[in-house]
Image (cartoon, helix red, strand yellow):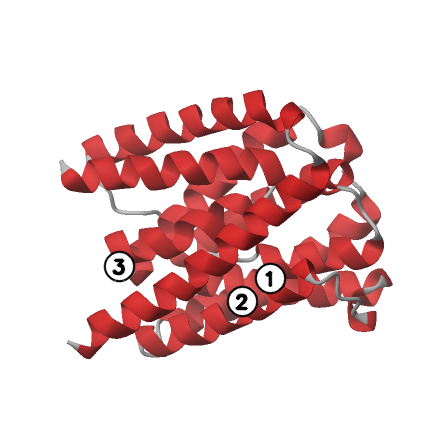
Amino acid sequence: MTMEVSLAAIVLLGGCVQWLTGMGFALVAAPALVLLLGPAQGVILANCAAGAISVVGLAGGWRRVRPAAMVPLCLAAACTVPAGAWMTRQLPRPVLLSVTGALVTAAVLLVLHGARVPALRGGKGAVTAGAVGGFMNAAAGVGGPPISLYALNAGWTVREFVPNAQFYGVAVNTLSLAANGAPHLTAPQWAVTATALTAGALTGSRIAPRIPEHRARHLVLLLAGGATTMTKGLWGVWAGH
């Protein structure tokens, strides 16, 4: 029962943040899911849940998707997702999580400080962000920071970013699940996950209009940085025993 309660809390928080920001589920929930279920199943469940809530969110905002940016992003991700999935089967888990955690933390800090990266502008920037995001998503369940950096350098508002992030989330998580397979959960765990994800989405949709844009952006990035640091530390301690 403790497992189900923890799973519900993680998915509920992730679902709420995902609805607010477009791709916060993996940043907030993936580190905790890895600690709860192990690296392989934690990443796969993060892909599955983030993809599902992105589908629901996209249903109401697909008209604001920018194909000119999303097509190269998704095509680039399709090329690197297999490499990320392969990497998870080759590197020792602590090494993989530490490397990916460092990448996520660096990207979060760049976004928080409003960094401008010339390599992430225009068509080439979309390809770069999509490729890095696809690899990180398949390897560690967290592919959002490169897309956030791309959007920042493109000057998108949160309103513009959310539907495009959800479109990318549907694509990259579908690709990641195809490469890594479906999560292995018990029937009660599936039920808890679905219920918590629905509750998180409903909660996020209710509070989204009340949160200013800059606060929503900082919320997910601060949570992401803290979660990443926590995962790296706790996983290192666990692996050392």
The quadrant where residue 208 appears: top right
> Considering only vertical position in the picture, is 61 above or below 229?
above
Q: Are marks 3 and 1 in contact (CB under 8 Å)?
A: no
Task: Report the residue marked by disc 2.
Answer: 105
Q: Residues within 10 Å of mark 3 (few under 14, many from 20)?
A: some
Residue at the image position 66 percent from the left and 59 percent from the top: 112
Q: How many marks?
A: 3
* Among numbered discs 3 and 1, the one appearing first in the sequence: 3
The quadrant where residue 1 appears: top left
Q: Amino acid at mark 2?
A: Thr
Residue 167 in view here:
no
Residue at the image position 67 percent from the left and 66 percent from the top: 110
Residue at the image position 37 percent from the left and 62 percent from the top: 230
Task: Report the residue marked by disc 3.
Answer: 38
Tag 2 secondary structure: helix
Residue 5 in view here:
yes
Q: Residues within 10 Å of mark 1 (few under 14, many from 20)?
A: many
